[in-house]
């Protein structure tokens, strides 16, 4: 089941590590899109934040759901994404292929550790997407980098 919820509200899912959204560069949530793997939220800053559920596996079907959700949330605007992968269990090769060819304009991947960052950077270097993509362990730094791509 996929749902889009539109309205101005602050989501507790955006809060992390007892820090406020403002301290992390966040903003009020304008719309939310729910998939099997997690929730996407479009903030007033036009960054789509995708928080993956603990233990989630992203397969081809889920990746297609996510691409549809991004298109629904962003509409004609550039697709600027922050993907919080810290809870991700697995991502299939089919899902990686869908994301590689996806309509993103800029993507920041948030990972749990510097080791994950090094491993992710290695694999991305082997199969670089057509859009700017960087891996971060700090959400604040990821958002700062993404803000350079907002119209």
Image (cartoon, helix red, strand yellow):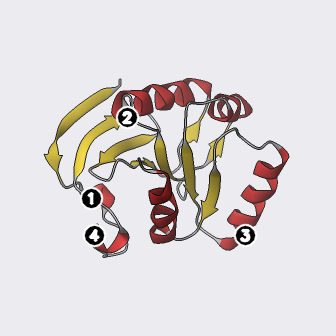
| 127 left or right, relative to 107 | right
Q: Residue 47 at x, y = what percent?
A: 39, 49
> Is residue 64 depicted above or below 136 in this figure?
above
**How packed is label 4: few (under 14 Cα within 10 Å), some, or many (20 or more)?**
few
Q: Residue 93 at x, y = what percent?
A: 74, 33
Marks 3 and 1, how far apart in space? 29 Å
Q: Nearer the viewer, residue 137 or 150?
A: 150
Mark toward the start of the polypeptide (4 vs 3): 4
Mark toward the start of the polypeptide (3 vs 1): 1
For label 3, the SS is helix
Marks 1 and 2, how far apart in space? 15 Å
Say the numbered circle drawn on residue 27. Answer: 1
**How packed is label 2: few (under 14 Cα within 10 Å), some, or many (20 or more)?**
some
Mark toward the start of the polypeptide (2 vs 4): 4
Residue to which mark 2 is pinned: 74
Q: Residue 121 at x, y = what percent?
A: 75, 58
Q: Residue at x 35, y 25 (%)?
A: 2
Mark toward the start of the polypeptide (1 vs 4): 4
Residue to which mark 3 is pinned: 115
Residue to which mark 4 is pinned: 22
Residue contact between numbered discs 3 and 2, judged by CB atoms under 8 Å: no
Residue found at the far right of this picture: 126
Mark toward the start of the polypeptide (1 vs 2): 1
**Which mark's residue is nearer the viewer, 4 or 3?**
4
Marks 4 and 3, how far apart in space? 28 Å
**How packed is label 1: few (under 14 Cα within 10 Å), some, or many (20 or more)?**
some
């Amino acid at each position: 089941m996929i749902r889009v919820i539109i309205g101005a509200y602050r989501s507790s899912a955006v809060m992390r590590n007892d820090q406020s959204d403002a301290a992390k560069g966040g903003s009020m949530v304008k719309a939310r899109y729910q998939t099997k793997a997690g929730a996407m939220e479009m903030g007033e800053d036009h960054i789509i934040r995708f928080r993956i559920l603990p233990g989630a596996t992203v397969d081809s079907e889920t990746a297609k759901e996510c691409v549809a959700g991004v298109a629904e949330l962003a509409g004609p605007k550039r697709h600027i994404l922050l993907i919080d992968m810290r809870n991700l269990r697995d991502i299939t090769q089919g899902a990686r292929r869908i994301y590689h060819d996806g309509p993103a304009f800029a993507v920041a991947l948030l990972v749990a550790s510097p080791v994950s960052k090094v491993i992710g950077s290695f694999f991305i270097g082997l199969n670089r997407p057509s859009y700017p993509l960087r891996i971060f362990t700090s959400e604040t730094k990821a958002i700062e980098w993404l803000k350079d791509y907002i119209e």
